[in-house]
Amino acid sequence: MSQMILDVQAFLETGGGVLNFIGLITIVMWTLMLERFYYFYRVFPGVAEGVQRDWQARDDHSSWAAHQIRRLRVSEMRMQLEDGLAYIRVLVALCPLLGLLGTVTGMIEVFDVMAIAGSGNAKAMAGGVSKATIPTMAGMVAALSGLILSARLENFAADEGERLADRLEIEHGGED
């Protein structure tokens, strides 16, 4: 376990300061995604069942007021389903940009070494090249993992919103 911690620490040092920020952003992004999965699979089914039970307990399903109440309840549930997804999208988009920032800072370090030691000292430039490539890779990996799961979360939210709307039946073919 301690060897793994040392390896991670060495990796973070090799990638430079931007890599720490990418790691932090990735942890926040994954925390938000895990919260959404928990909400979707553990909390929302009970909430949706309660909304459906409340709707079925109503005597009036066909008046204009009933249609507006149904529309309001469906809209509230869709908002709850989509809560936090915008933050996830922003963090997913931020990861490759931070990787690019790591590339730029690493290349600046390479140019500084070249200015001081000359272009013939490849060993001196290797640290800057590492700081240029590792954050780029980390930002892309974080963005890809977030992109795949955020798309699944968004599809799930849209599908569940539609299913809930379908379960709240209205009479006389009124508005949706």
Image (cartoon, grey):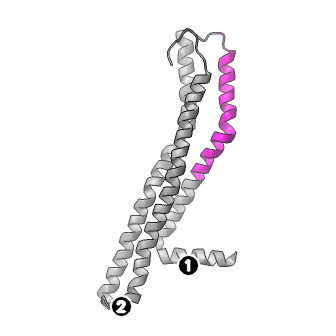
Label 1: state its secondary structure. Answer: helix
Image coordinates of residue 119 in percent, x first then y, are 30, 88
Q: What residue type is disc 2 on?
A: Asn
Label 2: state its secondary structure. Answer: loop
Label disc, if present, on residue 10 of the rendered structure? 1
Kindly report the distance in space between the C-alpha atoms of the residues bearing marks 2 and 1. 23 Å
Q: Which is more toward the observer, 43 or 123?
A: 123
Q: What residue type is disc 1 on?
A: Ala
Q: Is residue 166 left or right of residue 57?
A: left
Up the image or down, 135 lies above or below 56; here it is below
Residue at the spot 66% in from the left edge and 14% down from the top edge: 58
Residue at the spot 54% in from the left edge and 23% down from the top edge: 72
Q: Which is more toward the observer, 65 or 119?
A: 119
Q: Is residue 54 left or right of residue 146?
A: right
Q: Which residue is mark 2?
A: 121
Can residue 148 be seen in this snapshot? yes
Q: Is residue 105 left or right of residue 11?
A: left
Local packing at callout 1 (Cα closer than 10 Å; few below 14, some 14-19, many 20+) is few
Up the image or down, 45 lies above or below 65; here it is below
Q: Is residue 44 magenta?
A: yes
Q: Which is more toward the observer, 40 or 109?
A: 40
Give the magenta range. 31-59
Residue at the spot 43% in from the left edge and 67% down from the top edge: 136
Residue at the spot 32% in from the left edge and 89% down from the top edge: 116
Image coordinates of residue 130 in percent, x first then y, are 44, 77
Q: Is residue 131 magenta?
A: no
Local packing at callout 2 (Cα closer than 10 Å; few below 14, some 14-19, many 20+) is few
